[in-house]
Amino acid sequence: MVEVDRETGEVKVLRYIAVDDCGKQINPLLVAGQIHGGIAQGLAQALYEEVVYDENGQLLTGELMDYAVPKAFQLPRYECDHTETPTDVNPLGAKGAGEAGTIGATPAVANAVIDALSPFGVKHIDLPLKPEKLWRLMNSPSS
């Protein structure tokens, strides 16, 4: 669930719920950390991360000073749960969890923002969903 500020275009993630299945969890704390980190990366991809080149093909976002990475205060408190369906392809019944949070986060946030902007006729927005882009969509003459 997101909120988009009409004055600034800033997106605030109000609620994020994730349920994953990595089979048998050998170390639940490690799995939770992987899920949390993956969600943060997925949110970053949707809202902040952008590789920018100049007209000559020179990379302009080659350092973390130039490449937007979310800070802790920009991330919501996650509501996470899991199901456990052991796999039969290994004796432990474990599956991978490293990418689980990342895969769903980017489209979930993008769809939530598009849904929030639907009163403005928005049906699609190319990533990243930066504030200026969203502000323009909400404040264009056709809105």
Image (cartoon, rainbow, N blue to C red):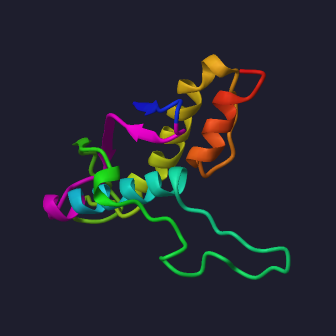
Q: Is residue 90 magenta?
A: no
Q: Determine if the magenta segment contains residue 25.
A: yes
Residue 57 in the image: state x and y as whole percent: 81, 79
Q: Residues in magenta?
A: 8-31
Horizontal and vertical percent for residue 4? 48, 32
Side (left or right) of 89 relative to 49: left
What residue lies at 59% left-to-right and 81% top-to-bottom? 62
Residue reaching furthest right? 56
Q: Residue furthest top?
A: 119
- Picture coordinates of residue 3, whole percent (x, y): 43, 31
Q: Is residue 26 left or right of residue 103?
A: left
Q: Is residue 49 above or below residue 124?
A: below
Q: Quadrant of the N terminus?
A: top left
Q: x, y (%) of residue 69?
A: 44, 65
Is 125 above or below relative to 56?
Answer: above
Which of these two is toward me, 85 or 49?
49
**Total marks placed:** 0
Residue at image coords 73%, 29%: 140
Seen at 76% across and 82% down, the residue is: 58
| Residue drawn 68% across the image and 37% down it | 136
Quadrant where the C terminus lies? top right
